[in-house]
Image (tube, rainbow, N blue to C red):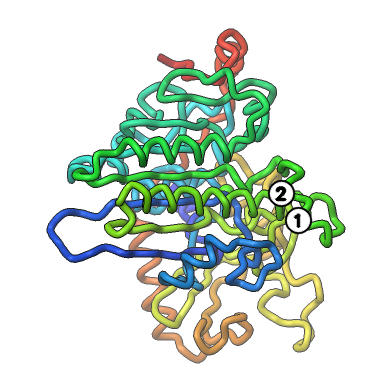
Protein backbone atom coordinates (compact mmCIF):
# COMPACT_ATOMS: atom_id res chain seq x y z
CA UNK A 1 0.00 0.00 0.00
CA UNK A 2 1.29 3.45 -0.83
CA UNK A 3 2.65 5.49 2.04
CA UNK A 4 0.07 8.20 1.71
CA UNK A 5 -2.91 5.93 2.03
CA UNK A 6 -1.26 3.96 4.81
CA UNK A 7 -0.74 7.15 6.73
CA UNK A 8 -4.38 7.91 6.19
CA UNK A 9 -5.60 4.95 8.14
CA UNK A 10 -5.11 5.42 11.81
CA UNK A 11 -5.89 9.05 12.49
CA UNK A 12 -9.58 8.57 12.01
CA UNK A 13 -9.65 6.33 15.01
CA UNK A 14 -11.48 7.64 17.96
CA UNK A 15 -12.16 7.66 21.62
CA UNK A 16 -15.04 9.02 23.56
CA UNK A 17 -14.06 11.97 25.68
CA UNK A 18 -15.46 14.29 28.30
CA UNK A 19 -16.93 17.42 26.84
CA UNK A 20 -19.22 20.10 28.01
CA UNK A 21 -20.24 23.41 26.65
CA UNK A 22 -21.57 26.33 28.59
CA UNK A 23 -23.00 29.28 26.82
CA UNK A 24 -24.40 32.31 28.49
CA UNK A 25 -24.17 34.51 25.47
CA UNK A 26 -26.75 37.24 25.29
CA UNK A 27 -28.16 38.31 21.98
CA UNK A 28 -26.32 41.09 20.24
CA UNK A 29 -23.89 41.92 17.51
CA UNK A 30 -20.59 41.61 19.33
CA UNK A 31 -18.95 38.20 19.30
CA UNK A 32 -18.82 36.29 22.60
CA UNK A 33 -15.74 35.77 24.72
CA UNK A 34 -14.47 32.21 24.35
CA UNK A 35 -12.93 30.14 27.12
CA UNK A 36 -11.58 26.87 25.72
CA UNK A 37 -10.35 24.53 28.45
CA UNK A 38 -8.51 21.32 27.60
CA UNK A 39 -7.82 18.93 30.47
CA UNK A 40 -5.05 16.63 29.30
CA UNK A 41 -5.87 12.90 29.45
CA UNK A 42 -8.91 13.33 31.72
CA UNK A 43 -10.70 10.02 32.21
CA UNK A 44 -14.32 9.47 31.32
CA UNK A 45 -15.36 8.31 34.79
CA UNK A 46 -13.21 10.80 36.65
CA UNK A 47 -15.69 13.67 36.90
CA UNK A 48 -18.52 13.94 39.38
CA UNK A 49 -21.24 14.25 36.76
CA UNK A 50 -20.19 10.84 35.44
CA UNK A 51 -20.47 9.32 38.91
CA UNK A 52 -16.88 9.59 40.10
CA UNK A 53 -15.94 9.79 43.76
CA UNK A 54 -13.36 12.35 42.72
CA UNK A 55 -14.82 15.72 43.63
CA UNK A 56 -15.33 18.06 40.69
CA UNK A 57 -18.03 20.45 41.94
CA UNK A 58 -17.07 23.27 39.60
CA UNK A 59 -17.07 21.14 36.47
CA UNK A 60 -20.27 19.43 37.62
CA UNK A 61 -21.98 22.79 38.02
CA UNK A 62 -20.93 23.82 34.52
CA UNK A 63 -22.24 20.51 33.20
CA UNK A 64 -25.57 21.05 34.95
CA UNK A 65 -25.90 24.54 33.47
CA UNK A 66 -24.57 23.66 30.03
CA UNK A 67 -24.71 21.05 27.33
CA UNK A 68 -23.00 17.71 27.90
CA UNK A 69 -21.84 15.88 24.81
CA UNK A 70 -21.68 12.31 26.02
CA UNK A 71 -20.58 10.80 22.75
CA UNK A 72 -18.10 12.52 20.51
CA UNK A 73 -14.78 11.68 18.97
CA UNK A 74 -11.21 12.82 19.29
CA UNK A 75 -7.81 11.58 18.19
CA UNK A 76 -6.11 9.14 20.55
CA UNK A 77 -2.94 11.07 21.43
CA UNK A 78 -1.87 14.61 22.18
CA UNK A 79 -0.17 16.05 19.09
CA UNK A 80 -2.62 14.75 16.48
CA UNK A 81 -5.68 15.74 18.51
CA UNK A 82 -4.30 19.21 19.30
CA UNK A 83 -3.39 19.75 15.65
CA UNK A 84 -7.02 19.01 14.80
CA UNK A 85 -8.25 21.37 17.52
CA UNK A 86 -6.10 24.22 16.22
CA UNK A 87 -6.86 23.71 12.51
CA UNK A 88 -10.22 21.96 12.29
CA UNK A 89 -8.60 19.37 10.03
CA UNK A 90 -7.97 15.67 10.32
CA UNK A 91 -4.26 15.09 10.95
CA UNK A 92 -4.11 12.98 7.78
CA UNK A 93 -4.61 16.28 5.97
CA UNK A 94 -1.86 18.18 7.77
CA UNK A 95 0.80 15.46 8.10
CA UNK A 96 0.44 15.37 11.89
CA UNK A 97 -1.00 11.87 12.07
CA UNK A 98 2.08 10.21 13.46
CA UNK A 99 2.68 9.78 17.17
CA UNK A 100 3.39 12.73 19.48
CA UNK A 101 6.18 15.23 19.01
CA UNK A 102 9.28 14.65 21.14
CA UNK A 103 11.48 17.45 22.51
CA UNK A 104 13.88 17.05 19.59
CA UNK A 105 11.35 16.40 16.83
CA UNK A 106 12.41 18.62 13.92
CA UNK A 107 8.93 19.44 12.65
CA UNK A 108 5.62 20.91 13.76
CA UNK A 109 2.14 21.87 12.61
CA UNK A 110 2.85 23.09 9.04
CA UNK A 111 2.92 26.85 8.74
CA UNK A 112 0.60 26.96 5.73
CA UNK A 113 -2.39 25.98 7.89
CA UNK A 114 -4.35 28.78 9.51
CA UNK A 115 -5.04 28.25 13.18
CA UNK A 116 -8.11 28.91 15.28
CA UNK A 117 -6.54 31.91 17.08
CA UNK A 118 -5.47 33.38 13.73
CA UNK A 119 -9.05 33.24 12.50
CA UNK A 120 -10.32 34.73 15.75
CA UNK A 121 -7.79 37.54 15.54
CA UNK A 122 -9.20 38.38 12.13
CA UNK A 123 -12.54 38.80 13.91
CA UNK A 124 -11.10 41.19 16.45
CA UNK A 125 -10.35 38.79 19.31
CA UNK A 126 -7.58 39.17 21.84
CA UNK A 127 -6.01 35.70 21.86
CA UNK A 128 -4.15 34.18 24.79
CA UNK A 129 -2.80 30.72 25.44
CA UNK A 130 -1.84 29.22 28.77
CA UNK A 131 -0.38 25.73 29.17
CA UNK A 132 0.63 22.98 26.79
CA UNK A 133 1.45 23.57 23.12
CA UNK A 134 2.87 20.30 21.75
CA UNK A 135 2.62 21.34 18.11
CA UNK A 136 6.28 22.00 17.41
CA UNK A 137 9.04 24.49 18.20
CA UNK A 138 12.00 23.56 16.03
CA UNK A 139 11.80 27.13 14.70
CA UNK A 140 10.26 30.16 16.38
CA UNK A 141 7.71 30.34 13.57
CA UNK A 142 6.10 27.17 14.94
CA UNK A 143 5.60 28.54 18.45
CA UNK A 144 2.32 29.92 19.82
CA UNK A 145 2.99 33.65 19.54
CA UNK A 146 3.73 33.13 15.83
CA UNK A 147 0.61 30.97 15.35
CA UNK A 148 -2.04 33.46 16.30
CA UNK A 149 -1.70 33.96 20.03
CA UNK A 150 -1.05 37.45 21.42
CA UNK A 151 0.49 35.86 24.47
CA UNK A 152 1.72 32.46 25.61
CA UNK A 153 2.52 31.21 29.09
CA UNK A 154 3.40 27.56 29.27
CA UNK A 155 5.52 24.83 27.74
CA UNK A 156 6.26 23.54 24.27
CA UNK A 157 6.46 19.80 24.93
CA UNK A 158 3.97 17.13 25.87
CA UNK A 159 4.54 16.86 29.60
CA UNK A 160 6.98 18.00 32.21
CA UNK A 161 7.56 17.59 35.90
CA UNK A 162 4.77 19.61 37.52
CA UNK A 163 7.18 21.14 40.07
CA UNK A 164 10.53 21.52 38.28
CA UNK A 165 8.98 22.17 34.84
CA UNK A 166 11.69 20.06 33.30
CA UNK A 167 11.41 17.60 30.43
CA UNK A 168 14.22 15.08 30.21
CA UNK A 169 15.93 17.13 32.92
CA UNK A 170 15.83 20.40 30.95
CA UNK A 171 13.49 23.32 31.67
CA UNK A 172 10.51 23.89 29.39
CA UNK A 173 8.59 26.99 30.45
CA UNK A 174 8.03 30.28 28.62
CA UNK A 175 6.40 33.64 29.13
CA UNK A 176 5.86 34.58 25.50
CA UNK A 177 9.37 33.87 24.16
CA UNK A 178 11.26 34.30 27.41
CA UNK A 179 12.33 31.33 29.52
CA UNK A 180 10.75 31.29 32.98
CA UNK A 181 13.41 30.15 35.41
CA UNK A 182 11.93 31.06 38.79
CA UNK A 183 9.02 28.64 39.08
CA UNK A 184 10.96 25.75 40.62
CA UNK A 185 8.75 24.11 43.23
CA UNK A 186 5.47 25.75 42.14
CA UNK A 187 2.92 23.25 40.88
CA UNK A 188 2.24 24.13 37.24
CA UNK A 189 -1.55 24.25 37.37
CA UNK A 190 -1.47 26.91 40.07
CA UNK A 191 0.80 29.08 37.93
CA UNK A 192 -1.42 28.55 34.88
CA UNK A 193 -4.59 29.50 36.76
CA UNK A 194 -2.89 32.57 38.17
CA UNK A 195 -1.85 33.73 34.69
CA UNK A 196 -5.37 33.11 33.38
CA UNK A 197 -6.80 35.29 36.13
CA UNK A 198 -4.33 38.07 35.27
CA UNK A 199 -5.29 37.90 31.59
CA UNK A 200 -8.99 38.06 32.44
CA UNK A 201 -8.55 40.89 34.94
CA UNK A 202 -6.59 43.08 32.53
CA UNK A 203 -8.74 42.35 29.49
CA UNK A 204 -10.59 45.26 27.93
CA UNK A 205 -14.13 43.90 27.97
CA UNK A 206 -15.15 45.88 24.92
CA UNK A 207 -13.05 43.45 22.83
CA UNK A 208 -13.83 39.76 22.54
CA UNK A 209 -11.44 37.48 24.44
CA UNK A 210 -10.23 34.04 23.36
CA UNK A 211 -8.48 32.22 26.19
CA UNK A 212 -7.10 28.76 25.43
CA UNK A 213 -6.43 27.05 28.76
CA UNK A 214 -4.46 23.91 27.95
CA UNK A 215 -3.83 22.38 31.37
CA UNK A 216 -1.09 19.81 31.92
CA UNK A 217 -3.32 18.23 34.53
CA UNK A 218 -4.16 15.43 34.60
CA UNK A 219 -1.35 14.18 32.37
CA UNK A 220 1.58 12.49 34.04
CA UNK A 221 3.91 12.58 35.78
CA UNK A 222 1.33 11.79 38.43
CA UNK A 223 2.07 14.41 41.08
CA UNK A 224 -0.08 16.50 43.40
CA UNK A 225 0.36 18.41 46.66
CA UNK A 226 -0.62 16.33 49.66
CA UNK A 227 -3.44 18.70 50.58
CA UNK A 228 -5.27 17.48 47.49
CA UNK A 229 -4.46 13.79 47.77
CA UNK A 230 -5.38 13.59 51.47
CA UNK A 231 -9.03 14.05 50.48
CA UNK A 232 -8.84 10.71 48.72
CA UNK A 233 -7.39 8.55 51.48
CA UNK A 234 -10.11 5.98 50.70
CA UNK A 235 -8.31 5.19 47.44
CA UNK A 236 -5.73 2.56 48.28
CA UNK A 237 -3.61 2.72 45.15
CA UNK A 238 -1.18 5.59 45.65
CA UNK A 239 -0.92 6.53 41.97
CA UNK A 240 -4.66 6.55 41.53
CA UNK A 241 -5.02 8.56 44.76
CA UNK A 242 -2.52 11.13 43.49
CA UNK A 243 -4.28 11.21 40.15
CA UNK A 244 -7.53 11.98 42.00
CA UNK A 245 -5.76 14.91 43.62
CA UNK A 246 -4.72 16.14 40.18
CA UNK A 247 -8.33 16.09 38.98
CA UNK A 248 -9.32 17.94 42.14
CA UNK A 249 -6.72 20.63 41.43
CA UNK A 250 -7.86 21.19 37.89
CA UNK A 251 -11.48 21.45 39.02
CA UNK A 252 -10.45 24.09 41.54
CA UNK A 253 -8.59 25.95 38.77
CA UNK A 254 -11.66 25.82 36.51
CA UNK A 255 -13.69 27.24 39.38
CA UNK A 256 -11.19 30.05 39.95
CA UNK A 257 -11.01 30.96 36.28
CA UNK A 258 -14.77 31.04 35.76
CA UNK A 259 -15.08 33.09 38.96
CA UNK A 260 -12.53 35.56 37.60
CA UNK A 261 -14.60 35.89 34.43
CA UNK A 262 -17.65 36.68 36.54
CA UNK A 263 -15.71 39.24 38.60
CA UNK A 264 -14.51 40.90 35.39
CA UNK A 265 -18.04 41.09 34.02
CA UNK A 266 -17.24 38.79 31.09
CA UNK A 267 -19.11 35.64 32.03
CA UNK A 268 -22.55 36.59 30.77
CA UNK A 269 -21.11 36.97 27.28
CA UNK A 270 -18.91 33.90 27.30
CA UNK A 271 -18.94 30.67 25.36
CA UNK A 272 -17.04 28.11 27.40
CA UNK A 273 -15.97 24.69 26.18
CA UNK A 274 -14.30 22.13 28.40
CA UNK A 275 -12.92 18.97 26.89
CA UNK A 276 -10.16 16.45 27.24
CA UNK A 277 -7.77 16.01 24.35
CA UNK A 278 -7.85 12.25 24.04
CA UNK A 279 -9.69 10.75 26.96
CA UNK A 280 -8.19 8.89 29.88
CA UNK A 281 -4.51 8.09 29.86
CA UNK A 282 -4.87 4.78 31.62
CA UNK A 283 -1.14 4.46 32.16
CA UNK A 284 -1.60 7.39 34.54
CA UNK A 285 -4.50 5.64 36.30
CA UNK A 286 -7.24 7.62 34.64
CA UNK A 287 -10.28 5.71 33.47
CA UNK A 288 -11.27 5.07 29.89
CA UNK A 289 -14.44 3.45 28.56
CA UNK A 290 -12.70 0.17 27.84
CA UNK A 291 -10.51 0.32 30.92
CA UNK A 292 -7.31 -1.18 29.66
CA UNK A 293 -3.66 -0.19 29.87
CA UNK A 294 -2.50 2.21 27.20
CA UNK A 295 -5.77 2.03 25.30
CA UNK A 296 -6.02 5.78 25.22
CA UNK A 297 -3.01 5.96 22.96
CA UNK A 298 -3.75 2.99 20.75
CA UNK A 299 -4.99 2.92 17.19
CA UNK A 300 -7.37 0.27 18.31
CA UNK A 301 -10.35 1.19 16.17
CA UNK A 302 -8.52 1.57 12.86
CA UNK A 303 -10.72 3.89 10.85
CA UNK A 304 -13.88 5.02 12.59
CA UNK A 305 -16.51 7.17 10.96
CA UNK A 306 -19.75 8.21 12.60
CA UNK A 307 -22.84 9.42 10.73
CA UNK A 308 -26.07 9.78 12.69
CA UNK A 309 -26.73 6.58 14.62
CA UNK A 310 -24.32 4.55 12.54
CA UNK A 311 -20.62 3.99 13.14
CA UNK A 312 -18.39 2.37 10.58
CA UNK A 313 -15.09 0.73 11.51
CA UNK A 314 -12.57 -0.29 8.90
CA UNK A 315 -9.23 -2.04 9.14
CA UNK A 316 -9.53 -2.78 12.81
CA UNK A 317 -7.66 -5.51 14.61
CA UNK A 318 -9.61 -8.70 14.03
CA UNK A 319 -9.24 -10.16 17.45
CA UNK A 320 -12.19 -10.84 19.67
CA UNK A 321 -13.56 -7.41 20.35
CA UNK A 322 -16.26 -7.92 17.79
CA UNK A 323 -17.30 -11.18 19.41
CA UNK A 324 -18.21 -10.71 23.07
CA UNK A 325 -17.37 -13.42 25.60
CA UNK A 326 -20.99 -14.52 25.92
CA UNK A 327 -20.85 -15.38 22.24
CA UNK A 328 -17.62 -17.29 22.52
CA UNK A 329 -15.05 -14.51 22.27
CA UNK A 330 -11.96 -14.69 24.39
CA UNK A 331 -11.99 -12.63 27.58
CA UNK A 332 -8.93 -10.70 26.44
CA UNK A 333 -11.08 -8.63 24.22
CA UNK A 334 -8.55 -7.08 21.94
CA UNK A 335 -5.03 -6.88 20.70
CA UNK A 336 -3.80 -3.48 21.66
CA UNK A 337 -0.67 -2.07 20.13
CA UNK A 338 1.71 -0.58 22.67
CA UNK A 339 2.76 2.80 21.39
CA UNK A 340 6.43 1.94 21.64
CA UNK A 341 5.96 -0.59 18.88
CA UNK A 342 4.65 1.77 16.26
CA UNK A 343 6.43 1.72 12.96
CA UNK A 344 7.93 5.13 12.44
CA UNK A 345 5.69 6.00 9.52
CA UNK A 346 3.48 3.11 8.69
CA UNK A 347 0.76 2.72 11.30
CA UNK A 348 -1.32 0.24 9.35
CA UNK A 349 1.62 -2.09 8.87
CA UNK A 350 2.12 -1.93 12.62
CA UNK A 351 -1.53 -2.68 13.22
CA UNK A 352 -1.39 -5.66 10.91
CA UNK A 353 1.73 -6.94 12.57
CA UNK A 354 0.31 -6.44 16.05
CA UNK A 355 -3.01 -8.08 15.47
CA UNK A 356 -2.16 -10.75 12.94
CA UNK A 357 -5.11 -9.83 10.76
CA UNK A 358 -7.46 -6.98 10.11
CA UNK A 359 -11.20 -6.98 10.00
CA UNK A 360 -12.21 -5.15 6.83
CA UNK A 361 -15.41 -3.62 8.05
CA UNK A 362 -17.89 -3.49 10.91
CA UNK A 363 -21.00 -1.39 11.35
CA UNK A 364 -22.87 -0.54 14.53
CA UNK A 365 -25.98 1.36 15.45
CA UNK A 366 -24.53 3.32 18.34
CA UNK A 367 -27.90 4.47 19.61
CA UNK A 368 -29.44 1.00 19.80
CA UNK A 369 -26.21 -0.85 20.55
CA UNK A 370 -23.84 1.52 22.38
CA UNK A 371 -21.46 -1.25 23.40
CA UNK A 372 -21.02 -2.28 19.77
CA UNK A 373 -21.84 -5.96 19.90
CA UNK A 374 -24.04 -6.42 16.86
CA UNK A 375 -22.18 -5.99 13.59
CA UNK A 376 -24.73 -4.81 11.02
CA UNK A 377 -22.38 -4.65 8.05
CA UNK A 378 -23.96 -7.64 6.27
CA UNK A 379 -27.51 -6.51 7.02
CA UNK A 380 -26.99 -2.94 5.84
CA UNK A 381 -24.59 -3.04 2.88
CA UNK A 382 -25.87 0.25 1.45
CA UNK A 383 -24.99 2.10 4.65
CA UNK A 384 -21.55 0.50 4.64
CA UNK A 385 -21.06 1.53 1.04
CA UNK A 386 -22.08 5.12 1.67
CA UNK A 387 -19.83 5.49 4.69
CA UNK A 388 -16.90 3.81 2.93
CA UNK A 389 -17.32 6.31 0.10
CA UNK A 390 -17.10 9.09 2.65
CA UNK A 391 -13.90 7.60 4.09
CA UNK A 392 -12.44 7.48 0.58
CA UNK A 393 -13.38 11.12 0.16
CA UNK A 394 -11.35 12.05 3.24
CA UNK A 395 -8.48 9.81 2.26
CA UNK A 396 -8.14 11.43 -1.14
CA UNK A 397 -6.76 14.49 0.62
CA UNK A 398 -4.38 12.53 2.84
CA UNK A 399 -0.73 13.51 2.91
CA UNK A 400 2.27 11.51 4.18
CA UNK A 401 3.20 11.87 7.81
CA UNK A 402 5.76 14.59 8.54
CA UNK A 403 7.45 12.39 11.11
CA UNK A 404 11.23 12.72 11.33
CA UNK A 405 13.48 11.28 14.03
CA UNK A 406 14.96 13.34 16.86
CA UNK A 407 17.55 15.93 15.84
CA UNK A 408 20.67 15.78 18.06
CA UNK A 409 21.16 19.53 17.56
CA UNK A 410 18.03 20.14 19.67
CA UNK A 411 19.70 18.54 22.69
CA UNK A 412 22.89 20.56 22.20
CA UNK A 413 21.00 23.87 22.01
CA UNK A 414 18.81 22.97 24.99
CA UNK A 415 21.79 22.01 27.11
CA UNK A 416 23.58 25.25 26.21
CA UNK A 417 20.59 27.46 26.98
CA UNK A 418 19.32 25.46 29.93
CA UNK A 419 15.86 25.42 28.34
CA UNK A 420 14.23 23.64 25.43
CA UNK A 421 14.35 26.21 22.66
CA UNK A 422 13.97 26.48 18.89
CA UNK A 423 17.23 25.29 17.36
CA UNK A 424 16.82 25.67 13.61
CA UNK A 425 16.65 29.46 13.29
CA1 LIG B 1 -3.30 13.94 26.02
Please tell me which residue lies in front, 361 or 15.
Answer: 15
Residue lying furthest front in this view?
263
As drawn, is 129 to the left or to the right of 43?
Answer: left
**Residue 274 rendering spot, x and y as whole percentages:** 46, 57
* Residue labelled with disc 1: 231
Rendered location of residue 192, percent (x, y): 51, 37
Check disc 1: other Cα within 10 Å, few if <14, some if 14-19, many if 20+.
Answer: some
Q: Give the crowd class for mark 2: few <14, some 14-19, many >=20 residues within 10 Å.
A: some
For marks 1 and 2, give the CA distance: 6 Å
Identify the secondary structure beneath mark 2.
Answer: helix
The reply to whether callout 1 and callout 2 are in contact (CB within 8 Å) is: yes
Q: Give the residue drawn at x 71%, y 70%.
A: 319
The residue at the far top in this view is 416
Disc number placed over residue 228 in the picture, else none: 2
Q: Where is residue 191 in the image (x, y as percent from the top left)?
A: 54, 34
Quadrant of the rendered structure where residue 317 is? Answer: bottom right
Residue 228 pos. (x, y %) = 71, 49
Examine the rendered structure and indicate whether residue 138 appears above or below residue 63: above
The circle on residue 386 is: none
Q: Is residue 204 left or right of residue 424?
A: left
In this picture, residue 342 sits left or right of residue 36: right
Q: At 57% across and 54% down in the image, what residue appears?
A: 251
Q: Residue furthest left?
A: 29
Q: Is 237 situated above or below 308? A: above
Secondary structure found at label 1: helix
Residue 425's image quarter? top left
Res. 339 visible in picture: yes
- Judging depth in this view, the residue of 183 and 95 nearest the camera is 183
Amino acid sequence: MAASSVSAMSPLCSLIAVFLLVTRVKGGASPPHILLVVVDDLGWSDVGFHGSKIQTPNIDKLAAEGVVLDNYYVLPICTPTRSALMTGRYPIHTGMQHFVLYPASPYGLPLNFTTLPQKLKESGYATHMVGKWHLGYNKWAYTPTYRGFDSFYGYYNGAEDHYTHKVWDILDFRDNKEAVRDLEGRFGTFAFAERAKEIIKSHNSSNPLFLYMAFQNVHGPVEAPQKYTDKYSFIEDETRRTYAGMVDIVDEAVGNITEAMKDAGLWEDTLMVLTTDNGGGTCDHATSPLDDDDLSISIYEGIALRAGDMKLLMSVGNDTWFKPPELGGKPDKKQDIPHGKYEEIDWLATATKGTGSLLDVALYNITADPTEHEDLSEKLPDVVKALQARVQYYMKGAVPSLYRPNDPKAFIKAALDGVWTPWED
